[in-house]
Image (tube, rainbow, N blue to C red):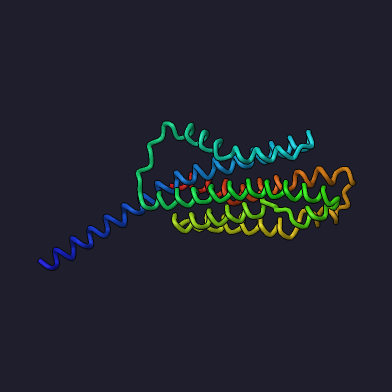
């Protein structure tokens, strides 16, 4: 009798383990598609923002980034319209909550950084000293990339995807250090670009960095999860 009970308990545990693994794979593919779409949308907006800013000289086009959540939701729903819905599970909930938290923090930080930078420009113009702005302004790109890398890495651990973990670490920390240590400006100084090209590169660089490290941190792991069997 006791042996049968042990066998039943072992069988139940085996069934539960297999079910969790099936849920993990199902959530992984769905998450992969979402990451892939999100990455492509961010890269597209980064390219569009660069083109518009260079052609018009208006930096307000960076506000196009605010449209990314709407763009991702619309495209994702269209792509998934004929696909079976992923069953609710603990793993799926953790993944969803991670990205919801990321979205709230990033959108709030992006808006607040724009408002703060506007205030710094105003103070610099009043003081007739633009050094006030350059010393105190917030560069949102590095923090957003760091938070993105953190979210991707956490998802990688949840979904047991080593590739996703490493892509998150490289994309997040790599993007942060590239911006924080002014690698672009250093390369520009070494290359001795003409003065008229300096503004163009300065305008394009943050968007290019966002696109490159988004590809590493979102698009690449998304594609790999999407293609896994």
Query: Which of the image's four quarters has the N terminus?
Result: bottom left
Residue under the point 63% across and 48% down: 112
The one nearer the camera, 43 or 225, is 43
Residue under the point 66% across and 48% down: 210
Q: Residue furthest front?
A: 126
Residue under the point 59% across and 40% down: 40
Q: Give percent across and percent down for residue 17.
A: 31, 57
Q: Give percent across and percent down for residue 110.
A: 63, 47
Q: Give percent across and percent down for residue 156.
A: 49, 56
The one nearer the camera, 141 or 116, is 116
State left or right for residue 122 relative to residue 173.
Answer: right
The one nearer the camera, 100 or 75, is 100
Q: Give percent across and percent down for residue 152.
A: 53, 53
The one nearer the camera, 85 or 119, is 119
Q: Residue furthest bottom?
A: 2
Task: Give the quadrant of residue 65.
Answer: top right
């Amino acid at each position: 009798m006791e042996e049968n009970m042990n066998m039943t308990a072992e069988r139940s545990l085996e069934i539960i383990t297999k079910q969790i693994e099936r849920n993990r794979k199902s959530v992984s593919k769905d998450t992969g598609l979402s990451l892939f779409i999100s990455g492509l949308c961010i890269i597209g907006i980064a390219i569009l923002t660069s083109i518009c800013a260079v052609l018009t000289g208006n930096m307000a086009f960076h506000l196009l980034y605010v449209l990314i959540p709407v763009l991702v939701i619309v495209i994702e729903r269209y792509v998934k319209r004929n696909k079976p819905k992923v069953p609710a599970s603990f793993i799926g909930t953790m993944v969803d909550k991670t990205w919801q938290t990321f979205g709230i923090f990033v959108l709030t930080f992006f808006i607040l950084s724009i408002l703060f930078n506007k205030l710094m420009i105003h103070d610099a113009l009043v003081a007739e000293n633009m050094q006030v702005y350059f010393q105190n302004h917030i560069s949102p790109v590095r923090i957003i990339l760091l938070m993105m890398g953190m979210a991707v890495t956490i998802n990688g651990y949840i979904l047991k995807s080593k590739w996703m973990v490493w892509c998150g670490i490289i994309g997040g920390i790599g993007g942060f250090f590239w911006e924080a240590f002014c690698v672009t400006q250093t390369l520009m100084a070494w290359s001795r670009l003409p003065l008229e090209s300096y503004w163009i590169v300065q305008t394009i660089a943050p968007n290019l960095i966002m696109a490159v490290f988004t590809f590493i941190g979102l698009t690449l792991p998304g594609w790999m999860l999407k293609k896994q069997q």
